[in-house]
Image (spheres, rainbow, N blue to C red):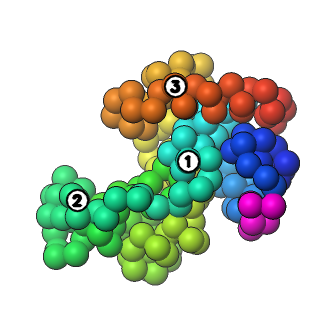
Amino acid sequence: MIDLSTLARVWECDPSLIKPYEVVELNDCLDKWDINTLSRIHHFMSQTAHESGGGRFKQELASGQAYEWRTDLGNCCAGDGPRFKGAGYIQITGRYWYQKFSDFIKDPRVMEGCPYVAENYPFTSAGFWWRENQMNELCDRHPSVLEVTRRVNGGTNGLSDREKYMRLCQRYILTV
């Protein structure tokens, strides 16, 4: 559905910076999680573009130490904060989300932590989070970028950047 050239335009980067497997994983993700209407695709792509700095970051830049012993994230053991810091293009965070993702895709190596998920499942983990948070249903109501951002981010962090990516998606992703 989305080719290398289109992804590079949305991410505003040279196509040579995108690895071919990333395009394959993106399209597999869109198919697997039914992100298959223009509204769903535009919102998914604009949110993941912002969260990843236009595809530059597959894992959270912070150390993850702030998540240590955060029981609301399922972090119950020493080292869980850094191990289960944000990974993927929507940055699943915490032992709870990693375990849930691992169980669903049946890959126990997910529990190795952030570097494994970031390198192997950047879009797939984002799509999993998208599905688990009923984002397709929200997108089917044609929400604003603000509404989607609040669900993804819990607030309005980076709203203008997310809106910029939405404009790029609407300009370059024209058909399903």
Q: Nearer the viewer, residue 72 or 79?
A: 79
- Categorize mark 2 by other alpha carbons within 10 Å: few (<14), some (14-19), many (20+): many
Q: Nearer the viewer, residue 38 or 13?
A: 13
Is residue 49 visible to us here? yes
Q: Which mark is residue 53?
A: 1
The secondary structure that most of the magenta stretch takes on is: helix
| 27 in relation to 172, above or below | below
Q: Which image quadrant is residue 133 in?
A: top left
Q: Earlier in the sequence, mark 3 or mark 1?
A: 1
Residue range in magenta is 16-21
Q: Position of residue 149 (x, y in %)?
A: 45, 30
Left/right of residue 118 with respect to residue 27 in the rendered view: left
Magenta span includes 56: no
Which residue is under mark 3?
A: 160
Q: Quadrant of the C terminus?
A: top right
Residue at x 50%, y 45% (from the top left corner): 51
Amino acid at dot 1 = Gly
Which residue is under mark 2?
A: 67
Specify the farthest residue to the front: 14
Cα distance in 3D space between marks 3 and 2: 27 Å
Q: Nearer the viewer, residue 65 or 146?
A: 65
Is residue 33 visible to us here? no
| 37 in relation to 85, above or below | above
Q: Earlier in the sequence, mark 3 or mark 2?
A: 2
Left/right of residue 165 with respect to residue 152 in the rendered view: right
Q: Earlier in the sequence, mark 1 or mark 2?
A: 1
- Categorize mark 3 by other alpha carbons within 10 Å: few (<14), some (14-19), many (20+): few
Q: Nearer the viewer, residue 163 or 24?
A: 163
Q: Position of residue 112 (x, y in %)?
A: 40, 79
Amino acid at dot 2 = Tyr
